[in-house]
Amino acid sequence: MSFIANTPEQQKQMLSEIGLSMDGLFADVPKEFLQKDFNLPSAMSEFDVRNRLAELAGKNHIDLTCFLGGGFYDHFIPAAVYAIIGRSEFYTAYTPYQPELSQGTLQAIFEYQSMICRLTDMEASNASLYDGGTALYEAMMMALRITNRNKILIDDSVNPIYRVMIHSYTKNLSIDLEETKNDQGLANRKALLEKLDENTAAIIVQNPNFFGCVDDFADLADAAHKKGALLIVSCYPISLGILKTPGAMGADIVTGEGQSLGLAMSFGGPYLGFMATKKEYVRKMPGRIVGRTKDNQGRTGFVLTLQAREQHIRRDKATSNICSNEALCALTALVYSSLLGKEGLKQTAQLCADKASYALQRLTAVKNVRTRFQAKWFFNEFVVELPANAAEVAGKLIEKGFAAGFPLSRYYEGMENSLLIAVTEKRTKQQIGMLAEALEAVL
Amino acid sequence: MKLIFDRSVDGRQGVMPPKSDVPTTIHIKKELLRASDAKLPELSELDVVRHFTELSRKNFGVDTNFYPLGSCTMKYNPKVAERIAAYPGFAHLHPLLPQLRLGGMLTQGALEVLYDMDKFLCELSAMAGFTMQPMAGAHGELAGIMIMAAYHRDKGNKKTTILIPDSAHGTNPASAAIAGYKVVAVPSDSQGMMDVEALKKMVNSETAGLMLTCPNTLGIFEKNIKQICEIIHSVDGLCYYDGANLNAIVGKARPGDFGFDIMHINLHKTFATPHGSGGPGAGPVGVVKKLVDFLPVSIVVKRNDGTFALEYDRQKSIGYIAPFYGNFAIILRAYVYILMLGREGLKAVSENAVLNANYVKEKLKDYYELPFGQTCKHECVFSAEKQLADGIHAIDIAKGLIDRGFHPPTVYFPTIVKEAIMIEPTETESKETLDAFIDTMIDLAKMSKAEPEKLKAAPITTPIGRLDETAAAKNVDIAEI
């Protein structure tokens, strides 16, 4: 099955019309390179492929009750999301280079940009980036460009998965990247302000942070601005249903992982990096941007704009190398947000917070289990300190049917007994109770 | 048509979140909460469905009609891959699961897909190992250049420069620059190939490597490819293969055999995963043996007992470039495609892609200027220079095609061809479709002479006409807040 339409007869006819043979078509490839055969499986029918893949899918244990988070969450996805993004007018199109044929995509991206601005209280958004981690890296690069400075401060309460990515990306660049160690689960004000100086391009923080703690960075924004530096905030979009927005805190660039907005977990992707900023920085922003304009008859339409920032025009002087982004994921996030709407998003965020609050109560009622940090406010994720090694306990809980949380020792020293637990609106009171019982049983 | 926000009616609600079964405790203090609700629309589910259905009808995809967008490989996207990507066993799998103790055993199906894809892509490219992590072609380029940098660092080489042909995709110089390199453009010769004599003069001890796509963006196979790679290797430079045009040779020839050391593959091009209106894609990066140690972590390995595991402890690795294992659901679709086609089918892909491109080229060459006339590979590049005499540009031909029901080819790229029209039919298009397109292109060539003003007014069949892009860039209106 190769999805090729032309019959052997037609192929022959076409070859004869252009006066070439099939071998002749490849005569320009040096003979030594023309491989005779490949060690690959033989073609399979659709029926056989589906059976084979169903078998593989069956080897993945999705039957565990999921309390894993770490920036990637098991949220409810309405059926209408799949119905809309499953329309092939969207998913079989490409980047809207021809606006007359792409008003669907272009208007959707414009609406997505508007939705991100409304969620974050910012003025401008791009059309998407790959994921939350690369979005944060791009924000850092953008801050370096805007300020023409060289130093970045990042607190270790920012998702460690993003931080290790940023370290990889900057290895070949001469950037002074300094990390501060969190203070009792919150961004370390004292250390950040001590390190903040005239060479600092940006402070990077996250809300809710990796430990689930909720913060207000208005003070950091003020301090950064006084030194001519920017504040970059990475955030969790569902939490913005109720939490103070990065815009209200005075953030200059806001990024985040959009997976929670209607995207399946899909073992790590595709996800959605979003980025928003102030209007004054739009021309320094990476990625595609859609703008509203008029056509030759005065009708409103949408078009890719500010392309002079981009690689296909500026080449090595571009603001980023990004070309394909995550357009269909951005559409997903827009559809999800529209279906939930103003009330639905708020209710979902509140549910997450309520259920997490309940889970913390139940779990810390288990003997010798306590909260790891004194920080009082958290959203839908929290860290518990266990009386035993968290990785071992999580391993035992798998046998009881729970993906109970993420052991923090992988990324944090001295946190061998700490487990990061996430609770979404999908978890029930009963499941939370059963987790508490299972935890008690394995300790 | 209205924006979705303008359809909002106060108090209307679409999807209800699950019912709460725990006490509602506003446990977060007021100062940490948002001052007013996010201004999301208030709509019924049907309102939302109608809005997006209407938007979808203002779009054009491969499923709509012929989409010969050069360099983008807009082939048919098999529906079965969509179905399989939605299997709960894949779609609902949390990426952190294998990072729990013994968690790898709970994700064996997904790890097997990643492992098999690594092996399949190695076989097809003559590379020794792949990372599935890059989330698009350009992301793969960046990862590849980071690997190049790590190699030179490891050897103590002082390298500053990457050579890139003037016909290259814009992502190449952008990726090299972002990774910290100086970019130098290598000129093309009169046959549309890299000027080898110029290259020889440009290569020196500072040369970190070369980025090249082959066939190049003119659709021409670089006949000196072996020599080009040797020149770069002579100064311990590395050769990077941009896999954007792999559809031309997939199943026939392998970049690793040409002499390339690092490459990416755009799964959304060669391996038929949907382009999604501009992503998500996937850009796995492969490397030859001496570079395998530099691949990003994690890597999927097969243990002696036949089970699969993620390996993180790799001293020389460039580290993490994605949060997890890449755009898994895209890799999965490509895996399905490879299984369905098998070795015979993949060979037929490149053969028919090249046949279709040459068929179009031969049939149109009397009507449009063909700057490079030799046998092309998967795409052919014309110029609207003949039409310029009547004031018709490439963009006018493109817009004329829209009114005839076709998606236009890529225009104004590659930039080394004036008024470029870059046509990539792909292998999944039939002779009937190609003939209809060819007839239309011939018609438009005639129309350029006979009724140029009519062509300049195109398109007239679309919801909107040509947009004022200058005004869009000047009066930046990019969000309704």
Image: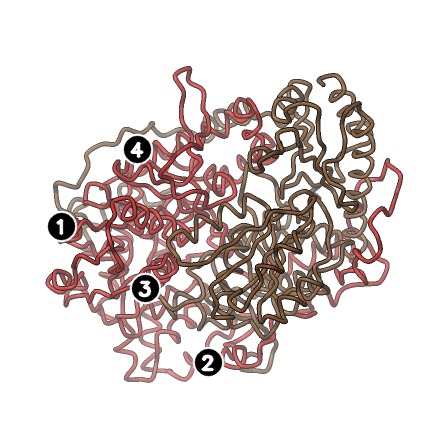
Chain colours: A brown, B red
Chain of the residue where label 4 is placed in the rendered structure? B
In the picture, which quadrant includes the C terminus of chain A?
top right
Q: Looking at the picture, does residue B470 appear above or below residue B286?
A: below
Label 2 or label 3, whichever comes before in sequence order: 3
For mark 1, what is the residue? Answer: B234
Label 3 or label 4, whichever comes before in sequence order: 4
Q: Looking at the picture, does residue A180 appear above or below residue A435?
A: below
> Between marks 2 and 3, how big is the CA–CA gap?
22 Å
Chain of the residue where label 2 is placed in the rendered structure? B
Q: Are marks 1 and 3 on the same chain?
A: yes
For mark 2, what is the residue? Answer: B457
> Between marks 2 and 1, how big is the CA–CA gap?
55 Å
Residue at the location (62% across, 45% down)?
Answer: A263
> Between marks 4 and 1, how big is the CA–CA gap?
35 Å
In the picture, which quadrant includes the N terminus of chain A?
top left
Would you say residue B64 is visible in this rendering?
no
Q: Is residue A217 left or right of residue B179?
A: right
Label 2 or label 1, whichever comes before in sequence order: 1
Mark closer to the observer (4, 2): 4
